[in-house]
Image (spheres, rainbow, N blue to C red):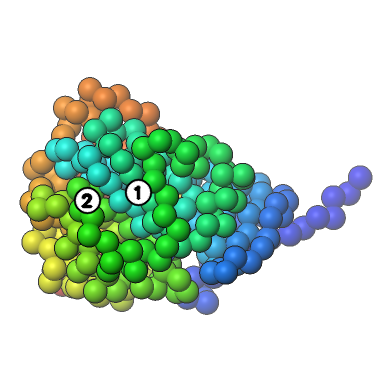
Amino acid sequence: MVDLWNVWYSELHQGRAGLTLKVKQVIYSGQSPFQRIDILETYEFGRMLVLYGSIMITEKDEFVYHEMISHVPLFTHPNPRRVLVIGGGDGGTVREVLKHPEVEQVTLVEIDQMVVEKCKEYFPQVACELDNPKTRILFQDGAQFMAETDEKFDVILVDASDPIGPAEVLFQKNFHQNIYNRLNEDGIMVTQSESPWYHQRTLRRMYENLRSIFPLVRIYWAYVPTYPSSIWSFTLCSKKYHPIKDFKADQYRELGISTNYYNAGIHQACFVLPNFIKKAILNRV
Ligand code: SAM
C-alpha cells in the first residue's frame, strides 16, 4: 500500500534558513498557560519536544546539551553540594547533575508544570531523576525566584528556552546579578547562550553583561545537531575556580560516569573558540 503520510516539521532560523525533519507521528499538541507544547515522533531524531515553536530536545541528541551544561561546571567546582537548575523542565540536566555523588540537593525552578508532566509521560529516559528524593521542583518563574530567594547555591545552571516568550527574562542582566548574589563565594554558574552563528548579538550582549558581574567568564561550545547551526554556546561564570586549571580530571576518571559526548578531552577542548566567535564576541583572535 502506498504511504500518503507526508508530514514535515520545519524550524526556521532568522526566517532565512532552517532544519526540516520528516514526522512519523504527532504524539501530543497542546497549550499550557505559558506556551504551545508539541511532541512529535520524527524518523531521524526520534521523539522531539517543541516549545513555543522551537526544538528543545530530541531523544537522539539531547545527551550533548545536558551533559555539557552539567559536567563542565560540576567537574570544576570541588564540592558542588547544592545545585540550582532554572528552566530544564524536561529533566535532562537534573539527570546529569545527579551523576555527581557530592550533590545533596538539586532544585529545579521551572515555570511550566505541564512541561514536567508531559516529559515524565513521553520522555521517561530524560525525566528519570525528577522523582529522585534529592530533586526539589518549584513551579515558578526563575527570574522571580532569583529575585526573592535567600537561599545560596554552589552551582546554578540556566537551562532556558530561547529568549522569546517566558524565557526572555532569563537573558537579562538583573537576573544574572541576582544569580551572582545567590551563589556561594566560590560558586559557578553556566547559562546556555544560544548559537554563536545565528545569535551573535544575544551572545555578545550576555557576555558583556556577565563580564561586568563575574570575575571569570568563559564561553564554551558543543555540537548539537538539532539546534540552529548545530554549534551551541554555553557561558561559564565563576567567582573563584578556573574551568581548566581547576578541572577535576582525576575525579572524572575515578567516578567512571557514563556519558556519550562529555569526556576529559572535551572538557578542555570545548573552551577553544574558532576565530569567527572570538572576533564577533571577544573582539580579538
Ligand atoms: N535545552 C533547551 C534549549 O536550549 O532549547 C532548553 C530546554 S528546557 C525544556 C527550557 C525550559 O525553560 C522550558 O521547560 C520552559 O518552560 C522553561 N522556562 C522558560 N521560561 C522560564 C522562566 N522564566 N522561568 C523558569 N523556567 C522557564
Contact? badges 2 and 1 (CB < 8 Å): yes
Question: In the image, is residue 99 above or below residue 180?
Answer: above
Q: Earlier in the sequence, mark 2 or mark 1?
A: 1
Question: In the image, is residue 193 above or below residue 121?
Answer: below
Horizontally, residue 7 falls left or right of residue 160, namely right
Instruction: Report the residue at 22% width, 59% height from top.
Output: 150
Q: Position of residue 22 (x, y in %)?
A: 67, 55
Instruction: Report the residue at 19% width, 73% height from top.
Output: 209
Closer to the camera, 141 or 55?
A: 141
Q: Position of residue 232 (x, y in %)?
A: 36, 57
Instruction: Report the residue at 66% width, 49% height from top.
Output: 41
Horizontally, residue 264 falls left or right of residue 169, namely left
**Dot 1: what SS?**
strand
Instruction: Report the residue at 16% width, 42% height from top.
Output: 77
Q: To which quarter of the image does residue 261 belong?
A: top left
Q: Position of residue 194 (x, y in %)?
A: 36, 64
Three-letter amino acid code at disc 2?
Phe
Please tell me how crowded label 2 is: few (under 14), some (14-19), or many (20+) other residues with Cα within 10 Å.
many
Q: To which quarter of the image does residue 52 belong?
A: bottom right
Can residue 281 be spotted in the picture? no
Disc 1 designates what residue? 107
- Split into 4 quadrants, where in the image is the C terminus? bottom left
Q: To which quarter of the image does residue 179 belong?
A: bottom left
Three-letter amino acid code at disc 1?
Thr
Disc 2 designates what residue? 153
**Dot 2: what SS?**
strand
- Split into 4 quadrants, where in the image is the N terminus? top right
Question: In the image, is residue 172 above or below residue 248?
Answer: below
